[in-house]
Each structure stands twice: as structure tokens, then as C-alpha cells.
Image (spheres, rainbow, N blue to C red):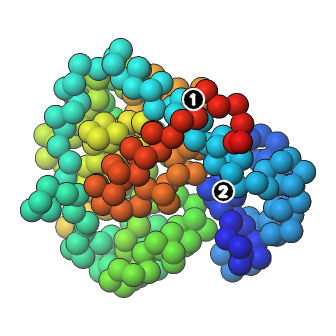
Amino acid sequence: MGANQSSASEVDVKNTLGVLYDDDAKRAFKAAAVKDPVSGEDRVSAAAARAFAKEHGLDNPKVVLFQNLCQFRIARPGIQAIYDEHFNGDVLRIPWSPLNADGSPAALGDVRRQSGLDGNPAGTLDSLYAAAEKARPVYEAVVSKALAKAGVSAPFAAAPLKGRDRAEQKARNECCGKTRPATSWLVDIVHGQVECQTEAQIVGLINALVADPDVEIVRLKNRFNPPEFNGYRDVLISIAVSIGQGITHICELQVHHTHIKHSDFMYKSHACYEYFRKYFVGNKSVVEERLNLLLELLVDDATSVD
């Protein structure tokens, strides 16, 4: 958490501690948290956060950095080994979309904003969630159909709709600089995830969704090519489904490979991601430069930050 913050959310604490945000830290956060009356999120006071950090030896930023860097250096080759064992490269040919003229990922334009049931950009959470409620069963049906075509037998159910408190925070903090209303940019109210056992199932699922006339692929991030900086690999898709009267609603689907997904318990790649995420903000060349710098640091044989 920043030096000037009087309190911290759980996301703040995760971003500060990374892999050191363990079960003890989670219990301490829950015990000390108070719900913010404005945002609705749980927060702990700066004093409580500092006291916990001092008690558990987490008040030295160099120690926290060292532990996260060590785990980072373990996670990347570990996930790479899983990829090498289970993939032959077909997944790398799934194209990103949309793209700019230079081949870089393009942002969604105003035309892709979410609509309410009246067809106008969703100006309130009520109008957005009314559309999401209608979209959820349609989304479940199209994903289930694509999974069946890909040979994935596990039943699919969408996750519960994104919590309103979290949606309000995201609209306020992440969408405030876009064309108003901010709520119309929330494209993950309806969301879900699937696990595929094989590379062929991942490719088959994407191909089935692309071929489905009832689905529009609005955005596809193939994070196998390239993988995330922490080594994690998946595919993130935003799909538009029809909810009647010419209105579509964008939903999010995260496609995992089972072995990579379940490796997080061992490699803590997601915690590494949260800790280093701000460090990797920038264009492709900046990310590559910073990644190479981290990988060159000699921590493999070190036993302490000193």
C-alpha cells in the first residue's frame, strides 16, 4: 500500500506482499477488515497493516521483493515444463483480436459498449445487470455447445454475476477515463471459466465459438503466445451473445489447460503476477526489457536478501 494511504483493500495487500500473502495474512486481514461505507469493499487500517507486517517480518520491502523474485524464477520454468510436455504448438496459431495496424492489441471502441435492455449504453448498474441476467443463460448455452464440439464432456455453468460492489469499483477506478457512462464498459459481469485437458480441446473450443453464427468474438487474448510475464498461459475471450431486439451483451470466458491451472498451488504464479504487475506496465519492448532484467538477477543460489 502507498505511503499516503490511511487504509488498504485486500487487493492492495496482495499487490504489496505477493507470495507472502499466505493463509495467516488472509485470516489477519479478515479479522481486522472494516467495510468502507462508500466503496463497499473491506479495508484494514494502515496501522493494522503495519503492525502485522512488523510482527511477521514483512516490513522490509527488500525481503518481500526477494521472496517474490525467488518464486517468480521458480514459476516460469515450472510452467514452461508443463507446456513442453502437453503442447505441440497448435495453440500458438490462435490469433489475437482485434489488432491495430502494427499488429499490437487494439482497444475496444465506443461501438462495443454494453447496452441496457432499451438499446442505449448502460448508464446504471441496474440497466447493465438487467441485460446481464438475460445474457447469462444464452452464454451458458453457446459455451456448452462449443465445449461439446471440442470434446469436453464436463458440464459448464457460468459463474455468479460479478458482485455489484466490485463492478462499481471497476467502473469508477478503471473505466472513468473512457466515454461515459463508465458502467457501459464493464464486459465481465457475465463470466466463467473452463478447463481443457488437452491442447486439441482448447483449439477445438475456440474454433467452435468462431464458427457459431450465434456468437461474435469481440476480443481474444491468446496468452499462450506470448505467455504472461509470470509464465502463466491461458486464453481470454470476450463474446457477444444476442438477448433479443437486436441487442447483444458481451460476456467473458477464460480458457485454461488443466495442468497449468492446477500448477498455481505449487508455483504461486498468480501471486507473483499480482506483485509484479505494476512493474510490467508498458508496451511490448518495455515489458521484454524488464523481464530480461529480472531473469538476469542472481537469486537462484541465494538464501537471503543480503
| Residue drawn at x 29%, y 20% as measured from the top left | 87
Of residues 144 and 219, which is closer to you in this image?
219
Q: Residues within 10 Å of mark 2 (few under 14, many from 20)?
A: many
Residue that mark 1 sits on: 300
Can you give x and y, in whole percent of width and height, for residue 187 in the image? 38, 62
Mark 2 is on which residue type? Thr
Quadrant assignment, res 82: top left
Quadrant in the picture for the C terminus: top right
Residue 64's tag is none
The residue singled out by tag 2 in the image is 16
Q: Quadrant of residue 248?
A: bottom left
Instruction: Give the percent coordinates (x, y) of residue 261.
Output: 48, 30
Instruction: Determine whether 23 is above or below 154 in the image.
Output: below
Label 1's element?
Answer: loop
**Is residue 290 in sight in this rendering?**
yes
Foreground pick, 299 / 65: 299
Left-right relation of 276 to 39: left
Q: Position of residue 15 (x, y in %)?
A: 62, 56
Q: In the structure shown, which secondary structural element does the residue marked by tag 2 occupy?
A: helix
Q: Nearer the viewer, mark 1 or mark 2?
A: 1
- From the viewer's side, name the closer residue of 175 and 103: 103
Position of residue 140 in the picture relative to residue 215 (left or right): right
Specify whether 111 is left or right of 295. Answer: left
Q: Is residue 121 left or right of residue 127?
A: left
Residue drawn at point x = 71 percent, y = 78 percent: 4
> In which quadrant will I find the N terminus?
bottom right
